[in-house]
Image (cartoon, rainbow, N blue to C red):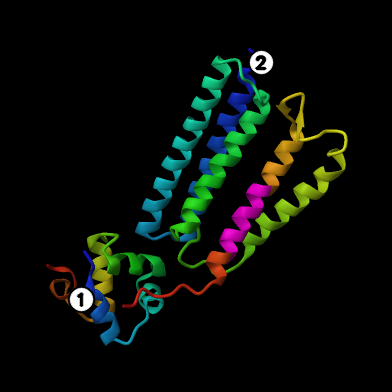
């Protein structure tokens, strides 16, 4: 299932996938895979992404 | 007895490559998805080698032999490397998160060119197929083609700007 909230949160911060990837120290393809729902990140990566986007886990990842 | 020696050699070389890959991973800061994809890559490469060996064993059982043992060993090594590299490059898991250079693709490209240039003078004496058996000239062509394809795919993946998956 696609993670549209992550994409929306990233767009709201005016960040590209590459910029978010560099901020959380992963590859751009990993961010793309999370947004497309092809990869389920670990809780550590979820937290790092939430911190980078100034969001809570609930706002970005909770169904 | 002596037929076992090439296989022992192949196992030693493969173990060496696994150690090199592991060290390479530690240095290169792969993220969690990349590590997962690389492990899948190892598994796929291993299964590919098993398939090749099964086919060769079946053909041998039917007394169809088209390559000597040492060529089969080399084919196994290069096919394994090729499958692993291709899978990882396509899945974006070959280069670490910090990697931005072109050293690996260029090394592969030069390895390809040098192999074929060095082997070319021997092609007149040693054709690729002799008496229905593949010869060492086939190895040179295969190694060169493997490295060439790897370098091209790596360069394409590094140079082409990837579209973000915006909708």
Which mark, residue B10? none
Residue under the image location 44 percent in, 36 percent down: B47
Q: Are marks 2 and 1 in contact (CB under 8 Å)?
A: no
Choose top left, top right, bottom left or bottom right for residue B119. top right
Magenta segment, prevailing SS (helix, strand or loop) = helix
SS for dot 2: loop
Question: Where residue B39 sits: x, y (%)?
Answer: 40, 46
Residue at the top extreme? B1
Residue under the image location 49 percent in, 25 percent down: B54
Question: Where residue B122 sits: x, y (%)?
Answer: 85, 38
Task: Indicate yes or no whether the magenta region holds residue B126.
Answer: no
Q: Circle 1 is placed at which residue position?
A: A5
Q: Chain of mark 1?
A: A
Report how far apart the C-alphas of labels 2 and 1 lie in the structure: 62 Å
Residue under the image location 63 percent in, 48 percent down: B146
Which stretch is magenta? Answer: B145-155
> Mark 1: few, some, or many residues within 10 Å (few <14, many ≥20)?
some
Have a look at marks 2 and 1 and say if they share a chain: no
Give the camera-side residue of B160 and B107: B160
* Count of numbered marks: 2
Is B54 located above or below residue B155 in the figure? above
Is B109 located above or below residue B137 in the figure? below
Q: Circle 2 is placed at which residue position?
A: B2
Question: Where residue B69 sits: x, y (%)?
Answer: 65, 24
């Amino acid at each position: 299932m696609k993670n549209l909230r992550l994409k929306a949160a990233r767009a709201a911060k005016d960040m590209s996938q590459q910029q978010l990837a560099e901020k959380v120290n992963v590859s751009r393809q990993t961010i793309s895979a999370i947004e497309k729902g092809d990869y389920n990140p670990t809780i550590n990566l979820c937290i790092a992404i939430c911190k980078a986007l100034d969001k809570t886990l609930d706002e970005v990842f909770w169904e | 007895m002596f037929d076992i020696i090439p296989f022992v050699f192949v196992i030693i070389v493969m173990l060496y490559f696994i150690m090199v890959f592991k060290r390479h991973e530690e240095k290169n800061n792969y993220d969690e998805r990349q590590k997962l994809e690389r492990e899948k890559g190892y598994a796929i490469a291993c299964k590919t080698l098993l398939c090749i060996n099964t086919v060769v064993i079946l053909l041998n059982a039917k007394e169809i032999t088209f390559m000597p043992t040492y060529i089969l060993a080399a084919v196994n090594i290069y096919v394994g490397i090729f499958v692993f590299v291709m899978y990882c490059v396509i899945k974006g898991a070959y280069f670490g998160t910090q990697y931005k250079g072109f050293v690996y693709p260029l090394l592969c490209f030069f390895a390809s060119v040098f192999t074929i240039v060095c082997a070319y003078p021997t092609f007149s004496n040693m054709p690729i197929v002799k008496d229905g058996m593949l010869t060492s000239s086939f190895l040179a062509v295969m190694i060169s083609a493997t490295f060439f394809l790897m370098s091209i795919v790596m360069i394409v993946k590094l140079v082409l700007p990837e579209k973000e998956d915006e909708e």
